[in-house]
Image (cartoon, rainbow, N blue to C red):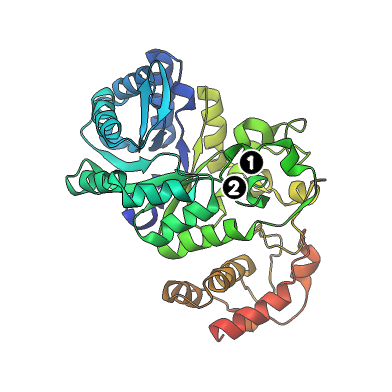
Amino acid sequence: MIKRTLGQTGLEIGEIGLGCEGFVGKDEQHTRALVDAAHRLGINYVDLYTSDPDARVNFGRAIAGRRQDFVLQAHLCTIWKNGQYKRTRKIEEVRSGFEEMLGQLGTDYLEIGMIHYVDSMEDWREIVQGPVMAYAKELKATGKIGHIGISSHNPVVALEAVKSGLIEVLMFSVNPCYDLLPASEDVEQLWADESYEKQLVNMDPQREALYETCQRAGVGITVMKAFGGGDLLDAALSPAGVALTNLQCLHYALTRPGVVTVLSGAHTVEQLEADAAYETACDEQKDYAAAFAAMPKISWKGHCMYCGHCAPCPVGIDVAAVTKFLNLAKAQGEVPETVREHYALLAHKAGECVGCGGCETRCPFGVPVQENMQAAKAIFGQ
């Protein structure tokens, strides 16, 4: 399993992680089988959004004796009340819910304390100005959580949280359909049929700015809904009108700026193994370019997808990397020092472009590569 550093936390985690969907409503034996498989496959990052006490207890028992092998991202503000899940901002419920969760999981700390489901700006302001963020800071100060994060589906709210400097990890929904939609406080708009009735063209600029800001600021993105709840894997259900493979969805998410790991919502060992097979899959199996270019309801014309089809460059320029650094600089309206340093490490710079145009003839999305190379040369000076 390839490991990536989770932003500025310093935690080394597998680029394929495990969601907890497969634990809900299942017995301890089933949960243990999933955890055993994750351990065997080198998957060490686990999201625990569920407040289901049985799921938590079963998972806690499954990691007993090997707690140190897993990095846990578990959620504050999600509690179990009257036999069902409830999101809360009431501080007494948040406090008691957290302590209850630690007991159920059989641990005394969490690597990531994720403030759960923040999709409105009003909610974010309430969290920051009220007792919830103060409690999260208290937990971090006492070592009960290592780092503070939030989960969100709204790029405007998420970007505000990232810019605040209060969070180090962002759990966000990333896939090639959701990424084209404008921000909304209504999460159901992401999969509503009416959201895709008209052709969508290119990534929503707020989502693009979010990913690039996370990359620059060192806020690690952990991805949920990479498969759109499974819809993207079925042509009849996919908003794009074509079916993608799990490997294509994983590759899309893992090539976005800022993304560190994609959480597999596997319900079976076989599904988890299929997602972990990303690590040994060939480039052709991961390649999403042809499938994206053929989407009848979605157009990525002119937008670099970092797919690598522009290669090979006769002078060795890594066109995708140069374009990614160019976009990072454009998004900030300046050249952050970290971006400049990473660009300087490239073996070949944009200024070496000979203008042969071969990259543009190979690009499935009609990206003006030569124009981008000239822009990069102007911005970075070489």
Mark 1: give few (<14), some (14-19) or many (20+) Cα within 10 Å: many
Of callouts 1 and 2, the N-terminal one: 2
Q: Can you say whether 173 is above or below 93 in the image? A: below
Q: Which mark is residue 313?
A: none
Q: Which mark is residue 184?
A: 2
Residue 317 rendering spot, x and y as whole percentages? 62, 73
Q: Identify the image quadrant of the C terminus.
A: bottom right
Q: Amino acid at mark 2?
A: Ser
Residue 311 rendering spot, x and y as whole percentages? 69, 65
Residue drawn at the location 67% of the way across and 82% of the way down:
374
**What separation in Å lies between label 1 and label 2 (alpha carbons)?**
8 Å
Give 362 or 51, whichever is nearer the viewer. 51
Residue 96: quadrant of the picture: top left
Q: Can you say whether 143 is above or below 337 in the image? A: above
Residue 26 rendering spot, x and y as whole percentages? 45, 15
Mark 2: give few (<14), some (14-19) or many (20+) Cα within 10 Å: some
Q: Is residue 366 left or right of residue 158?
A: right
Residue 69 rendering spot, x and y as whole percentages? 30, 36
Give 241 or 83, whichever is nearer the viewer. 83
Q: In this view of the protein, can residue 299 be seen by the observer?
A: yes
Give 123 or 39, whichever is nearer the viewer. 123
Tell me, yes or no, whether the two marked residues, 1 and 2, touch with CB atoms within 8 Å. Answer: yes
Q: Which mark is residue 190?
A: 1
